[in-house]
Amino acid sequence: MSKKRKQLKKRLGKRETFTGEFVRHGTKNGWYGPDKTVLLKDVEAAEGEPVADHLWFNFTKGFEALGKLQAGDVIRFDARVTRYQKGYFGRREDVYKPAGIDYRLSRPTKISLVQRGAGGDQL
């Protein structure tokens, strides 16, 4: 776990305001086919304390309401800090990804665009 993610551990279970810079969209395997995702980097708490290098979120209606996002757009949102198990839980011995606990931001709400990227104007 990185030093930044340890800042999330201190906030476990709390719902707070965060900001992050949009990088790109992605996809993950979902129950009914591919689900769209959003990658944010340099995620900080409201007071400016870094909490994660990057985080992935599901592309919810809140993100969709922002319109077409561009790399560098700064997004503000509220989210709850939760923990999850990560790593490899299979039986193959040739795969080495030790299982462990990590922390994430869940259920983002009040999603808003703070600043457009690439020299854009503040909103």
Image (tube, rainbow, N blue to C red):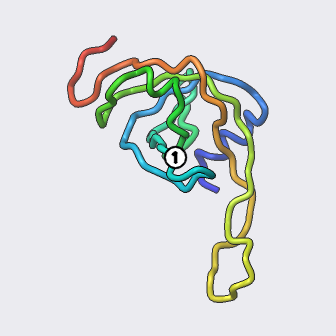
Image quadrant of residue 121?
top left
* Crowd around label 1: few <14 · some 14–19 · many ≥20 (10 Å): some
103 to the left or right of 49: right
Of residue 64 and residue 6, the one placed in the foreground of this image is 64
Looking at numbered disc 1 in the image, what kind of residue is underneath it? Asp
Q: Specify the farthest residue to the right.
A: 13
Q: Position of residue 108 (x, y in %)?
A: 60, 28
Residue drawn at x 46%, y 40% as measured from the top left: 38
66 to 90, vertically: above or below: above
Q: Which residue is mark 1?
A: 35
Q: Quadrant of the C terminus?
A: top left
Q: Position of residue 22 (x, y in %)?
A: 39, 36
Q: Is residue 59 above or below residue 103?
A: above
For the N terminus, which image quadrant? bottom right
Q: Position of residue 98 (x, y in %)?
A: 69, 72
> Measuring 69% from the left and 60% from the top, which residue is drawn there?
86
Q: Height in image: 91 above or below 86?
A: below
Location of residue 106 (image quadrant): top right
Q: Nearer the viewer, residue 103 or 33?
A: 33
Q: Residue furthest left?
A: 119
Q: In the rendered view, does 119 fall on the left or right side of 81?
A: left
Percent of width and height locating residue 72: 31, 34
